[in-house]
Image (cartoon, rainbow, N blue to C red):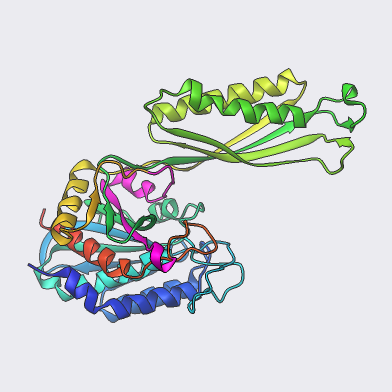
């Protein structure tokens, strides 16, 4: 049996060098030009069939096994975030105001390493590996754009895989949920319009600040009073803007935030209550409201059989590891869901934090960094899981 963990360890310097290079040169969604060029260069060096410019800056490559069999799609995201890095690392971002604060630099380096690992054993593989390097995961719809561009066709995959380095858990931990893994996400924007006036004469106004304040409070009752206690959901108002001066009641207040759910019926209930509360309270205070709801991504729902196989591979590969197969669910969202909606798959997590090395900052934090020993572990698990699924 191929020892993917030992082989990934041999390639550690390769993986680390790629990760650090990507980290020093981060690119925002749909701007991953340099990253995509490096990805294509490495894949072309293996002699793979490589397609560039997919959905703008995406890269797709086919790795053909020595025998016929199923098609497994493995995906990595490439984009960075508009955050100023504060890690002080020697490989810190050299691009002002942009950094890899979520591990996508690691994901890209990992999948390139997986390509090397599987290419070395391609004669033993029965089937095809579709390597997908996706742009713009961070809220810009990169996965949906790739689906529209035909990434799930020619050939159509039988199963999909993706992973996330996870700083919420320590190095050595692996999370493989059977069923819901990450929440679906909506973005909401609300404009509350009233009648402005002098702060000393509020009776002459219809105060949108007062109306908006009541709306913010009331929205928090949706989860606590309309959703069953054993079901999960989040409604968070994250911005509120209104007013320009201390003595002027403004004409308008704007709110925005996010809704997170797993089950379709919970989502529909929240959206229904959201509009009833917002429009109703605005009217109560003599104002009007405009609600804009945008679906960011559906929930990531793992196929139980695929997740079970990935978990079994993880237990064989890491017998000493802490493998969480039941409670690894997060209200964070992931647009890999667009691919997994159409093709069953598994989205799993690899612990990457190391508190002793001060490498445990949260995702999207200016000090985010991870223990690079997670890189070969993740590459080995992805490669071994693909090889196992090809046996099916």
Residue at (17, 73) in percent of width and height: 6
- Visible in this render: residue 193? no
Q: Return the x and y of residue 99 as percentages of the image width and height.
A: 53, 67
Q: Is residue 38 magenta?
A: no
Q: Toward the viewer: 200 or 346?
A: 200
Numbered disc total: 0
Residue lying furthest front: 356
Assign the N terminus to one quadrant of the image.
bottom left
- Visible in this render: residue 132? yes
Q: Return the x and y of residue 112 as percentages of the image width and height.
A: 31, 71
Residue at (52, 28) in percent of width and height: 271
User: Does residue 130 lie above or below 205 as drawn?
Assistant: below
Q: Toward the viewer: 263 or 129?
A: 263
Q: Is residue 354 magenta?
A: yes
Q: Return the x and y of residue 82 as percentages of the image width and height.
A: 58, 62
Residue at (70, 30) in percent of width and height: 213
User: Does residue 148 lie above or below 235 as drawn?
Assistant: below
What segment carries the magenta color?
330-358
Q: Toward the viewer: 220 or 361?
A: 361
Residue lying furthest left: 1
User: Does residue 165 lie above or below 303 as drawn?
Assistant: below
Residue at (38, 28) in percent of width and height: 231
Image quadrant in which you'd find residue 98: bottom right
Q: Is residue 345 left or right of residue 237?
A: left
Q: Return the x and y of residue 302 as percentages of the image width and height.
A: 28, 44
Image quadrant in which you'd find residue 299: top left
Q: Toward the viewer: 143 or 85?
A: 85
User: Does residue 67 lie above or below 310 as drawn?
Assistant: below
Q: Is residue 309 left or right of residue 352?
A: left
């Amino acid at each position: 049996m191929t020892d993917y963990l030992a082989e990934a360890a041999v390639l550690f310097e390769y993986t680390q060098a790629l990760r650090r290079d990507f980290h020093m040169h981060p690119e925002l969604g749909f701007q991953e030009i340099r990253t995509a060029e490096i990805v294509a260069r490495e894949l072309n060096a293996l002699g793979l069939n490589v397609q560039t410019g997919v959905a703008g800056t995406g890269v797709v490559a086919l790795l053909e096994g020595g025998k016929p069999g199923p098609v497994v799609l493995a995906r990595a995201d490439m984009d960075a975030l508009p955050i100023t890095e504060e890690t002080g690392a020697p490989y810190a971002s050299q691009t002002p105001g942009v950094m890899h604060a979520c591990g996508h630099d690691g994901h890209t380096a990992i999948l390139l390493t997986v390509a090397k690992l599987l290419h070395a054993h391609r004669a033993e593989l029965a089937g095809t590996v579709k390597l997908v390097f996706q742009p713009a995961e961070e809220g810009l719809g990169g996965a949906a754009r790739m689906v529209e561009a035909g990434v799930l066709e020619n050939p159509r995959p039988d199963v999909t895989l993706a992973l996330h380095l996870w700083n919420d858990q320590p190095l050595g931990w692996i999370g493989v949920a059977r069923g819901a893994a990450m929440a679906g996400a909506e973005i909401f924007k609300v404009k509350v319009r009233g009648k402005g006036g002098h702060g000393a004469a509020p009776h002459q106004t219809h105060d949108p600040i007062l109306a908006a304040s009541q709306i913010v409070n009331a929205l928090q009752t949706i989860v606590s009073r309309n959703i069953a206690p054993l079901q999960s959901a989040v409604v968070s108002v994250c911005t509120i803007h209104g007013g320009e001066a201390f003595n002027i009641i403004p004409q308008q207040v704007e709110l925005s935030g996010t809704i997170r759910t797993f089950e379709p019926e919970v989502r529909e209930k929240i959206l229904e209550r959201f509009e009833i509360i917002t429009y109703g309270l605005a009217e109560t205070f003599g104002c009007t409201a405009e609600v804009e709801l945008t679906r960011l991504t559906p929930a990531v729902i793992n196929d139980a059989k695929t997740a079970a196989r990935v978990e079994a591979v993880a237990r064989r590969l890491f017998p000493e590891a802490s493998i969480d197969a039941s409670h690894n669910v997060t209200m964070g969202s992931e647009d890999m869901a667009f691919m997994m909606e159409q093709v069953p798959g598994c989205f799993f997590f690899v612990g990457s934090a190391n508190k002793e090395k001060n490498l445990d900052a949260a995702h999207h934090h200016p000090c985010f960094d991870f223990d690079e020993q997670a890189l070969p572990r993740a590459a080995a698990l992805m490669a071994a899981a693909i090889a196992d699924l090809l046996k099916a």
